[in-house]
Image (tube, rainbow, N blue to C red):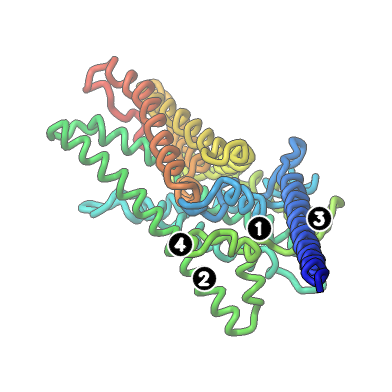
């Protein structure tokens, strides 16, 4: 009896030791699980980082702006994860020739659409400026193509040739977005119009504050039309995907997985939808040339050569007013292809698309120089052909080198602060160069001398 308390205490100690041992074992298992999870997360992060590394010898299929927008409350790590998930794989070697060949016809088509819309909108008593409709239509189509990108990428061929069709569809998407939409809209002509309203180059009798108000009206109206057109196009794309799903033409999961939405749901985190944004692993692109590749490249060469021959051989006596349009078609592919090549620099900065900024600024500077040449007596007095070439460079090369559709998409996609900085810097820097080039040229001459020498 005297030892029972000791025995009881010993048993209690044993029980406590067993309990402590179980607790320690449980804690050890949890710690091991956490370590394993962290290792897996680190491995996944390393894999994603490796995928996202840019090879300087390869071109990316995406313009850097075409990414879903991060929410304001997201961390930098979350944004990096989503950007990594939606990055496109590097292009095969043959794409260096194939992609520009696809851009050529779409850029000419976009130029003709822009010139046609401007011509239709130019009339006495027009309510809005002529460039309003091209900017709106181009951004609407951009939103449509971005939202239906999965459909374009994978829905162009039969399942038996899905491996090749995926890459042909991706090439066509670049032709539609960079070639067509980028050529319908123009950043340089918009900024030239802003500058003309700001300094009143038309010498309209009005107060200087009214000049500022007129420029702000064109600025705000263009941005509003562009972003609203982008959003409307995205809604139309969603409707088309829904109709295709209802009619059994495609998988809803596939369509939404390969599409890049312009807007994100505010209540949910972007990590919740990140798996849906991850496309299935694409097939390895063929490095050898196919018959379709040869047909596309040959057709592009024939088209561009034919346009150049038409510009040279068109009679001066007949249809003289069409010469500058044909010349613009000659210069349009060069501007669109250069803009697409510059877009590879968008990945250098996550908060400021350097490629689009360089294309828009460079095209605007070239346009400012062309405007000065158009106001010289030598251009209009000695050669009408010079006027047509300058007009073709203005509408074709500068108009297709610069773009509002990608600019609006980038503003919509970037974080709020970065989008404001990018938009303000793009417009302000361009206006400064317009002031230095066109303004200095105009103010060093009498007001009567600053007249358009090229009228055709």
Q: Earlier in the sequence, mark 4 or mark 1?
A: 1
Q: In 3D space, how far apart are the residues under numbered discs 2 and 1 (Cα atoms)? A: 19 Å
Camera-nearest residue between 228 and 367: 228
Disc 4: which residue: 266
Disc 2: which residue: 238
Q: In 3D space, how far apart are the residues under numbered discs 1 and 3 (Cα atoms)? A: 15 Å
Q: In 3D space, how far apart are the residues under numbered discs 4 and 1 (Cα atoms)? A: 32 Å
- Foreground tag (2 vs 1): 2
Q: Earlier in the sequence, mark 2 or mark 4?
A: 2
Give the percent coordinates (x, y) of residue 290.
83, 57
Which structural element holds mark 1? Answer: helix
- Foreground tag (2 vs 4): 4
Residue 367, quarter of picture: top left
Numbered tag placed on residue 285 in the rendering: 3
Q: Residue furthest top?
A: 444
Disc 1: which residue: 172
């Amino acid at each position: 009896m005297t030892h029972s308390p000791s025995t009881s205490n010993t048993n209690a100690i044993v029980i406590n030791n067993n309990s402590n041992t179980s607790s320690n074992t449980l804690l050890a298992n949890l710690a091991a699980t956490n370590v394993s999870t962290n290792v897996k997360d680190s491995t996944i992060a390393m894999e994603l980082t490796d995928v996202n590394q840019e090879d300087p010898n390869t071109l990316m299929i995406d313009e850097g702006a075409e990414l879903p927008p991060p929410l304001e409350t997201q961390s930098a790590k979350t944004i990096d994860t989503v950007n990594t998930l939606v990055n496109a794989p590097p292009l095969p070697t043959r794409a260096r020739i194939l992609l520009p060949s696809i851009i050529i016809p779409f850029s000419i088509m976009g130029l003709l659409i822009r010139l046609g819309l401007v011509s239709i909108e130019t009339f006495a008593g027009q309510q809005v400026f002529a460039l309003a409709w091209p900017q709106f239509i181009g951004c609407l189509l951009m939103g449509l193509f971005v939202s239906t990108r999965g459909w374009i990428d994978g829905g162009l061929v039969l399942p038996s040739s899905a491996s090749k069709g995926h890459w042909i569809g991706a090439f066509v998407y670049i032709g539609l977005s960079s070639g067509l939409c980028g050529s319908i809209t123009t950043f340089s002509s918009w900024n030239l119009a802003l500058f003309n309203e700001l300094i009143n180059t038309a010498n309209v009798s009005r107060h200087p504050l009214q000049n500022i108000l007129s420029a702000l009206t064109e600025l705000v109206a263009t941005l509003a039309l562009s972003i609203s057109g982008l959003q409307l196009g995205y809604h139309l794309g969603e409707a088309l995907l829904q109709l295709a799903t209802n009619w059994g033409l495609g998988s809803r999961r596939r369509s939404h997985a390969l599409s890049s939405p312009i807007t994100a749901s505010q209540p949910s985190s972007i990590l919740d939808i990140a798996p849906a944004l991850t496309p299935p692993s694409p097939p390895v692109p063929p490095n050898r040339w196919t018959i379709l590749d040869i047909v596309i490249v040959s057709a592009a060469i024939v088209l561009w050569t034919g346009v150049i021959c038409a510009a040279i051989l068109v009679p001066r006596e007949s249809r003289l007013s069409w010469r500058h349009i044909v010349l613009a078609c000659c210069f349009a592919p060069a501007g669109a292809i250069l803009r697409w090549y510059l877009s590879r620099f968008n990945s250098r900065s996550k908060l400021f698309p350097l490629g689009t900024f360089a294309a828009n600024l460079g095209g605007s500077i070239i346009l400012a120089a062309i405007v000065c040449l158009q106001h010289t007596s030598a251009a209009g007095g000695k050669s009408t052909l010079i006027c047509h070439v300058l007009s073709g460079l203005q509408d074709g090369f500068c108009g297709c080198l610069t773009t509002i559709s990608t600019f609006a998409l980038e503003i919509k996609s970037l974080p709020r602060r970065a989008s404001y900085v990018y938009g303000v810097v793009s417009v302000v820097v361009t206006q400064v160069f317009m002031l230095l080039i066109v303004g200095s040229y105009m103010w060093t001459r009498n007001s009567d001398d600053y007249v358009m020498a090229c009228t055709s």
